[in-house]
């Protein structure tokens, strides 16, 4: 009787261990779950981020919530800083405006657009800007009725990018100032939790990453447009259109330089500027200084 009971208990223990093992095997680890989810996320990103008015990003649950959440977990596994802080209004605006500059200059380049979206959501680590000749490859493939229309396209793209830089630069400077205040506030507090310190430092790193990425993307666009203009001048020469395209390119280059200098405006060298005489008066010249009483 005792032997039979021992056999029954032994069988029960083996069944319990087997059931426990199956339960553990059926419970995926976070890293394995993300690895299994990655191909599906990459397939979703193949449609690129939806675009709304004026080239701005359109709201999307997949691209604004699901993919960034998965990207944060993958970034943590790679050892990158990830902040759980809520975004400020300026940080949201800066990211939206930066995306307009980071996305590929050619809207038809869905492969590069998908890769950029995977890097924006941190599913993939950030890498280089790709091949600058891709812009001209798509431009050349478009069957315009007039060969001069390609010059107009380059000029329009460069002009549109130049108009995006000043408002982006303004919001980026506000985010930088807020980051400095965030770090000063941490320094003024006698007691800060490890979570607060890590979150603040990670958010400053994330903001700086976006700004650096936008600057690199603008430099990439300058090279892409320059290559396209030079190639068009050889393939389909047009002196008037080349001048227009070069003028637009120089305008964008000036805005990029201004951004890299911290959006400083005004007299860079500090010279005393002479005041021009009003048109109401005859002749042109400089105004004499006001008399001192």
Image (spheres, helix red, strand yellow):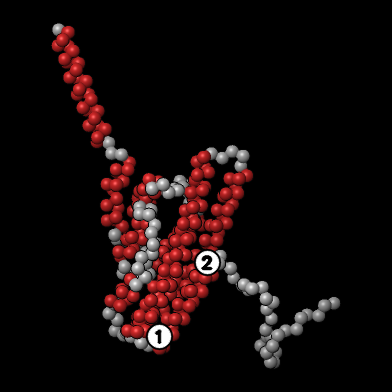
Q: Nearer the viewer, mark 2 or mark 1?
A: 2
Which residue is pictured at 24% across the width and 35% down the height?
25
Q: How far across and how far down the image is residue 31, in percent?
A: 32, 43
Does residue 139 appear anywhere in the picture?
yes
Which residue is pictured at 38% across the width and 64% down the height?
129
- Residue that label 1 marks: 241
N-term mark: 2 or 1: 1
Which residue is pictured at 46% across the width and 81% down the height?
247
**Residue 32 vertical placement versus 107 (above, below):** above
Quarter-of-image position of residue 100: bottom left
Quarter-of-image position of residue 267: bottom right
Asked if residue 183 lies left or right of residue 73, the reply is: right
Extreme residue toward the bottom, this view: 282
Q: How far across and how far down the image is residue 7, in percent?
A: 16, 15
Disc 1 packing (10 Å; few <14; some 14–19; many ≥20): some
The quarter of the image holding the C terminus is bottom right
Q: Depth check: give the residue in front, 128 or 241.
A: 128
Does residue 61 appear anywhere in the picture?
no
């Amino acid at each position: 009787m005792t032997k039979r009971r021992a056999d029954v208990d032994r069988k029960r223990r083996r069944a319990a261990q087997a059931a426990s093992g199956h339960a553990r095997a059926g419970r995926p680890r976070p890293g394995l779950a993300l690895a299994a989810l990655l191909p599906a996320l990459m397939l979703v990103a193949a449609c690129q981020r939806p675009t709304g008015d004026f080239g701005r990003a359109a709201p999307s649950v997949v691209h604004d919530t699901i993919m960034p959440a998965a990207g944060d977990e993958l970034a943590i596994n790679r050892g990158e800083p990830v902040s759980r802080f809520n975004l400020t209004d300026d940080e949201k605006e800066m990211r939206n405006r930066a995306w307009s500059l980071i996305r590929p200059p050619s809207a038809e380049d869905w492969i590069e657009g998908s890769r950029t979206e995977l890097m924006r959501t941190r599913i993939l680590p950030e890498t280089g800007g790709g091949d600058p000749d891709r812009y001209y490859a798509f431009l050349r493939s478009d069957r315009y009725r007039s060969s001069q229309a390609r010059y107009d396209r380059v000029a329009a793209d460069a002009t549109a990018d130049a108009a995006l830089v000043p408002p982006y630069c303004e919001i980026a400077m506000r985010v930088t100032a807020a980051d400095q205040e965030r770090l000063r506030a941490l320094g003024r507090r006698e007691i800060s939790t490890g979570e607060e310190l890590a979150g603040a430092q990670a958010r400053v790193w994330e903001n700086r990453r976006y700004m650096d990425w936008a600057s690199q993307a603008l430099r990439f666009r300058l090279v892409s447009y320059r290559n396209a203009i030079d190639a068009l001048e050889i393939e389909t020469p047009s002196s008037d259109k080349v001048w227009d395209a070069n003028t637009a390119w120089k305008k964008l280059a000036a805005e990029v330089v201004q951004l890299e200098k911290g959006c400083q405006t005004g007299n860079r060298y500090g010279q005393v500027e002479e005041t021009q005489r009003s048109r109401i008066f005859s002749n042109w010249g400089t105004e004499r200084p006001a008399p001192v009483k």
